[in-house]
Amino acid sequence: MAKSESWEWVKAVAVALILAIVIRYFFFAPIVVDGQSMMPTLEHNDRMIVNKIGYTIGEPERFDIIVFHAPQNKDYIKRVIGLPGDTLYYKNDVLYINDTPMEEPYLDNFKREATRYPYTGDFHLNEVTDFDRVPEGHVFVLGDNRQHSKDSRHIGVIPYEEVVGKANLVFWPFSEVRIVE
């Protein structure tokens, strides 16, 4: 009897471990925000859940906050600005995508508190990458803290294969649990 009960416990623990591994690998994973590049949207040491579900079958959408594999075996967290086929540039602190000015309400408070202007310096996509348009299967990303972010202006466009998932749930610190946009 004791042997049968022990075996049942071993099987239950094994199934639980396998489920945990499958969920973490294919569906959700934790990440710790490292640095100030996404302030004020995300703070240094915020703990988030990365949703991998949509990104295993779909493509990133404009203004999604994504996690991706970056150079030097690091994962970065940034905001998707340009999608495949887009032209983009900044002029006088305004984002233009396909020659249409875009609003970035997530930057409003930070722009008001900035001590240096413009908040986002002028640039054209072809000045910071080798492309006139974001290539197929790639995205152009920026950190929300534009003056202190290593992003596509420095590391180039990001291939879809390097995107881990979308991050929009902060679960720690507990007093700051929230959905971020």
Image (cartoon, rainbow, N blue to C red):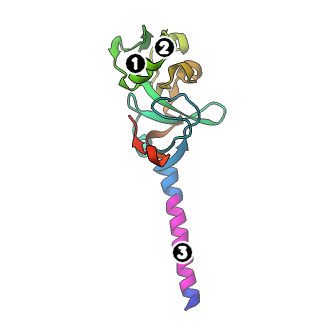
Q: Measure how far apart labels 2 and 1 are at the Cα level.
A: 9 Å
Q: Are marks 2 and 1 in contact (CB under 8 Å)?
A: yes
Residue 46, x across and y down, in percent: 52, 41
Quadrant housing residue 65: top left
Q: Which amino acid, by three-letter code, is at mark 2?
A: Leu
| Outermost residue to the bottom | 1
In the picture of the structure, the residue carrying the numbered disc 3 is 11
Decide if residue 98 is in sight here.
yes
| 101 relative to 37, above or below | above
Residue 75 against residue 127 in the figure, above or below: below
Q: Magenta residues?
A: 5-20
Give the image location of residue 60, x and y in percent.
Answer: 41, 33
Report the quarter where the N terminus lies. bottom right
Are the residues tagged 3 and 1 within 8 Å (C-beta)?
no
Which disc number belongs to residue 125? 2
Does the segment drawn in magenta span residue 10? yes
Residue 62: horizontal and vertical position, in percent? 38, 28
